[in-house]
Amino acid sequence: MRDASSLASSHDDIRIRLFCDDLSVLNTIAHGDAVGYGATLGIEVLPWSAAESPDVLSSIGDVVIEAFACHLPETYVTAMTQRSVAPIWINLEYLTAEAWADDMHLMPSPQNNGLSKYFYFPGFTAKTGGVTLGNWDEAVDVLGASAAPPSLKTVLAKCRNGAKRVSIFNYRHAPLDEWLRTLNTAALTNGDLVDVLICAGQNVSIATLVPALTAVQLIELPFVPQEDYDWLVAHCDMNLVRGEDSFVRAQWAGKPFIWDIYPQSDLAHEVKLNAFLERYFEDATPTLGSLGTLAMKWGSPTDWWPHLGAWTEHSEAWRQKLVGLGHLEGKILDFVKSQEISR
């Protein structure tokens, strides 16, 4: 949805169709109505089955993007081959910091039907495809830097003056109980108050944990739209994030974060995490790189919390590096233009 809305807003003449295999999930992050909300953004949101409807098959797009390991319906691919000018076919892969992505990015894959598919790898180098920006700037400053979105006003009213803010959005395996206890110890040692804004469904024993926390206050968050979550991440001092989307939001925020990468049975996620940490901390001091890596792997906050200021400066420098590399949507458009010129 982020990529689609950003592409739609970049040029008035770009028409976007977004096919989704589970609109109920998309509804939850799109104000309860993905179809209606998409229309306000200039996006035609359709169920996956619509990709095989006569109306769609008779008007295949100039650019077709299949994202995150989906596979286009065969009838749709057949319709792509029947266009007088073949569409530009992009396979949008998962984000990775691994070095091989530099060589694989935009690699063409000729298909048996005469089409070519280009593999697009988001990443953190000039040779890869950047990361999704979306409407980040508008979302984090839509009401002014000091004004919260309506969905967050009630919970933010519970925050204490002068307290640092930490948001938590993790997978359920995350060891949050012990992490919060040691965060409380770190806050007490450093004379801090910490308000923890925690998303629903986290692995936290609130009933037994809360009485043990004296410097840390837990505040439960309601479910909020994507852009309101962006605002929250941008206005916290630290963020615990997961997967890919919130992971990228935390980087655009320019604040310290802990990435709860999606676990894989073959432990491939550890390779991906280490590749990112090596790149993310490559310009950091040895001390910050060591402590930041420890933090990312659930090390005790008592070790790294005193260095949060230095980590914040590093995070802002990293954000500026991402700005310099260019965001994913813009780089996709640049690639499309280059292909159109070469035809």
Image (tube, rainbow, N blue to C red):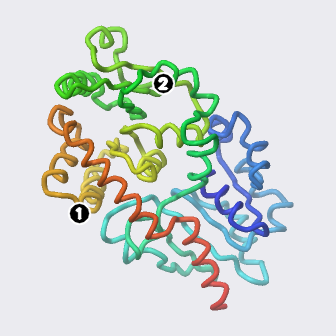
Q: Is residue 55 left or right of residue 155?
A: right
Q: Is residue 17 above or below residue 311?
A: below
| Residue for point 77% across, 78% down | 82
Of residues 278 and 269, the one drawn nearer to the viewer in this rendering: 278
Of residues 157 and 174, the one drawn nearer to the viewer in this rendering: 157
Measured in 3D between alpha carbons, the distance from the residue under mark 1 to the one under mark 2, in whole angstroms, is 34 Å
Of residues 256 and 55, the one drawn nearer to the viewer in this rendering: 256
Q: Is residue 21 above or below residue 108?
A: above
Q: Is residue 209 above or below residue 153?
A: above
Q: Amino acid at mark 2?
A: Ala
Residue 254 drawn at (x, y percent): 40, 51
Residue 80 has which mark? none
SS class of the residue under badge 2? loop
* Residue annotated with mark 2: 200
Q: Are marks 1 and 2 in contact (CB under 8 Å)?
A: no
* Residue annotated with mark 1: 282
SS class of the residue under badge 1? loop
- Asked which quadrant contains residue 261, the reply is top left
Residue 308 drawn at (x, y percent): 26, 41
| Residue for point 73% across, 68% down | 11
Residue 233 drawn at (x, y percent): 46, 40
